[in-house]
Amino acid sequence: MNTQQLRFDDMAAGDELPPWTAPQLTRTMFVRYAGASGDFNPIHHDEEFAKSAGYPTVFGHGMLTAGILSRYVTDLAGVGNVRLFRVRFATQVWPGDSLTCSGKIAKKYHEGGENRVDLDLTVINHKGEAAIHGVTTIAI
Amino acid sequence: MPETTDAEDLGLTWPVERGKVREFAASILDDNADYQREDAHIPVTFPWTRSFWRPAAAPSGGGQANMARVLHGEQEYRYLGPVRVGDVLTARSRVVDKYTKEGRRGGALTFTVTETTVTNQHDEVVILERATVIVTERATSETNS
């Protein structure tokens, strides 16, 4: 998608924003995020390590899912317009998962000399389970 | 979760590099052209990458044996000012809470909450970060928490 224009005057609490489904997760994405973030916990890339720890396979970094969600937010608000971003990790994400980000307007108001909007956020996997519950405040 | 938590950062200073911002944006599947700019804003969760700038000898938070049982509970960023390529940031962290809960399927869960204040090269506070890390007694596929 990438930066669609939200209009403050047209927004109302309770409005749902168009959801966005990210490309299906792959182990390569986990490795790329490990390299970019510096988070080399082997549970995210080493199949043997993950299995020996009792997992069926490797799983994605929580912060990768958070990053994907942050992209959804900056696509809505524009880069540099995020004032608050908070996530709670609910379940792990696995190779092959398809994650859908969605947002709902909780509140709009004027603060810090700018129009701000609070959004409730979720990331849901293709089975309908929440991977992340989040909130964000964006400047519009 | 990375091998290190922030608990040991009494003042970690690191530069916001253009290539690193591009690399990180790509890793979160973000192809926004704004991240290609010379003066790009950082992606929201980019401060996570500061672990690269820890001294090599920094404590590793328990080492690999623990890595299978470390879970990320929550993460929060508050941006008080813009952060762009070229800025030099300093993070100071402290543990603000630590508590233990019983997991749903048995096994203790230890929660550690760390707050980090990030200042820029002008001594302005630009980011407040809060992280909750959970250490489980067994693999989380069993505790489901």
Image (cartoon, rainbow, N blue to C red):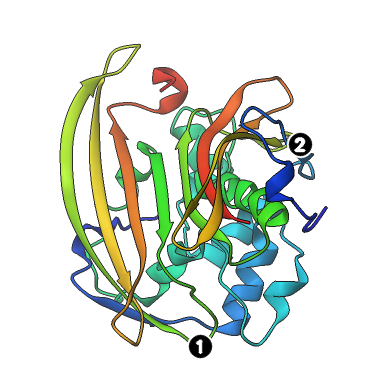
Q: Label 1: which residue?
A: B86
Residue B20 horizontal/vertical position (percent): 58, 77
Along the viewing direction, whichever of A82 and A114 lies nearer the viewer: A114
Position of residue B46 measured from the top left corner of the image (x, y, whole percent): 51, 65
Q: Amino acid at mark 1?
A: Gly
Quarter the C terminus of chain A occupies = bottom right
Q: Position of residue A131 (x, y in %)?
A: 57, 31
- Neighbor class of circle 2 (other Cα within 10 Å; few <14, some 14-19, many 20+) is some
B52 displayed left or right of B40: left
Which residue carries the number 2 mark? A19
Chain letter of the residue beneath label 1 in the structure image: B
* The one of A66 and A36 positioned closer to us in this rendering: A66
Q: Can you tell which quarter of the image residue B118 is in?
A: bottom left
Task: Tell me the residue at 58%/50% (across/down).
Answer: A64
Which secondary structure lies at badge 1?
loop
> Dots 1 and 2: beta carbons under 8 Å?
no
Q: In the rendering, which numbered label is found on residue B4? A: none
- Chain under label 2? A
Whether B88 is drawn above or below A110: the answer is: below
Q: Is residue A25 left or right of residue B138?
A: right
